[in-house]
Image (cartoon, helix red, strand yellow):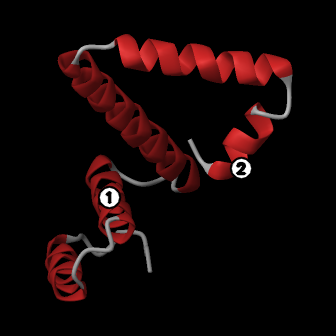
Amino acid sequence: MHDHELEIANSTAAGREALALRLRILQSLTPEQKLMKSFELTELTRQTMRAGIRRDHPDATQPELDWLCADRLLQFQKLCPEIRQEVLRRRQAMRPQSAIATE
């Protein structure tokens, strides 16, 4: 949860109660449950990202969507510039001429 979200939640009694409940729930989880929850949240985040990319590029083929998603993840991870450039170079070599521009 980001600082501004905590600030908003703490601004009301209901928000403070919800935060306390959230904390109790998280503290009650076993390490395995916490790990599974992190996997679930990661998958939800990827699905949300993919849906946004699909919305922004409605005519993209499945392989193009896969490349766009991979590129977004590489940008997000702030991957070593040399590695990202190599991935982008390989992507360009594999892309059909009809592929959409991402840069």
Residue type at tag 2 = His
* Residue 88 falls in image quadrant: bottom left
Residue that carries the numbered disc 2 in the rendered image: 4
Residue that carries the numbered disc 1 in the rendered image: 64
Q: Give SS at disc 2.
A: helix
Please give left or right for residue 56 compared with residue 102 in the image: right
Against 18, residue 93 (above or below) is below
Against 95, residue 16 (above or below) is above
Please give left or right for residue 49 compared with residue 70 in the image: right
* Residue 16 falls in image quadrant: top right
Dot placed on the residue nearer the N-terminal end, 1 or 2: 2
Q: Position of residue 59 (x, y in %)?
A: 48, 53
Q: Position of residue 44 (x, y in %)?
A: 41, 31
Q: Quadrant of the N terminus?
A: top right
Separation of residues labelled 1 and 2 (CA atoms): 35 Å
Q: Give SS at disc 1.
A: helix
Report the number of numbered marks.
2
Q: Position of residue 94 (x, y in %)?
A: 15, 72
Of the numbered discs in the image, which one, if any, rests on residue 7? none
Residue type at tag 1 = Glu
Against 13, residue 85 (above or below) is below
Q: Residue at x 39, y 18 (%)?
A: 27
Q: Residue at x 35, y 53 (%)?
A: 65
Against 88, residue 70 (above or below) is above
Judging depth in this view, the residue of 40 and 52 nearest the camera is 40
Determine contact: label 1, label 2, CB under 8 Å: no
Q: Residues within 10 Å of mark 1 (few under 14, many from 20)?
A: many
